Image (cartoon, rainbow, N blue to C red):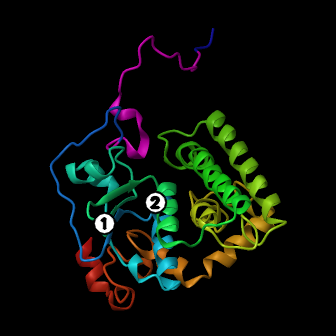
Amino acid sequence: MSESNEYVPPKVWTWDKESGGQFANINRPISGATHDKELPVGRHPLQLYSLATPNGVKVTIMLEELLALGHSGAEYDAWLIRIGNGDQFGTGFVDVNPNSKIPALVDRSTATPIRVFESASILFYLAEKFGTLLPTDLAGRAECMSWLFWQMGSAPYLGGGFGHFYAYAPTKQEYPINRFAMEVKRQLDVLDKRLAENQFVVGDEYTIADIAIWPWYGGLVEGWLYGAAEFLSVLDYKHVRCWADEIAKRPAVQRGRMVNRVFGEPSSQLHERHDATDFETRTQDKLVAEK
């Protein structure tokens, strides 16, 4: 009689620090701070604390797009939060986001600073604050918000589901990889059919829906996420690829991708951003010093 390798859940789950894969050192079943660490504050009204993951990139792209549109009030300081080191569990960061996830934003242009966390919430907050990249008519606004929340509901299947089991889990397992690959491909198909009829996700207008969706699904078809482009046959989604390519050419998007980036080619990284000139004045020596 052969032994079964099937996992049998215990009656009561207990935390095993060794079972979390690549991120086991920072994952835990409790919230709150683990150490005292205040957040730095720069000279601009908007203070961003983030890392260039897809969720972080959403906000830096948004801010760079706002600046490109002439909204000087969108000037910002972007401070690096190294999640692999547990920076998100410092007391200062937890005060801004009790969920300990990047990105987190503090708007100090008001009498009492306003904290904003969750990437879609930050995009919506900034769109309303500056009156742009969000349709003003009822139907267009509803469509935009529907796609914005589509992304927020769908991306966990891509990141925490497929990405985790395909790229980060301690062992490769057929069932979860197949399960989440199927769902990611279904989502790509949803997006591809939408973009077959529209230049951008909402229609002819570039909005926060595109800004939210592009770092995840655009990044996937561009080959930047999980090394899974071939596995997922992303070339099949030609409308998503055309949309992703078009957005990738936007100067504000190219700048936004660089901010708080600590991986890839050194020329693609700007660990912190405090002024527009930082994109031009960064040097290899500065990048090395920031590591």
Who is closer to the viewer here, 53 or 153? 153
Type of amino acid under label 1? Thr
| Magenta residue check for 126 | no
Give residue 279's position: percent from left, percent from top. 39, 86
Q: Quadrant of residue 18?
A: top left
Type of amino acid under label 2? Ile
Q: In what element is the residue under mark 1? A: loop
Q: In what element is the residue under mark 2? A: helix
Q: Residue at x 46, y 68 (%)?
A: 129
Q: Which residues are magenta?
A: 4-26
Q: Is residue 98 visible?
A: yes
Q: Which residue is mark 1?
A: 110
In the image, residue 270 above or below residue 146: below
Question: Which is nearer the N-term, disc 1 or disc 2?
Answer: 1
**Residue lying furthest left in this view?**
36
Give residue 171's position: percent from left, percent from top. 51, 38
| Magenta residue check for 17 | yes
Q: Residues within 10 Å of mark 2 (few under 14, many from 20)?
A: many
Q: Which residue is mark 2?
A: 122
Q: Is residue 135 left or right of residue 52?
A: right
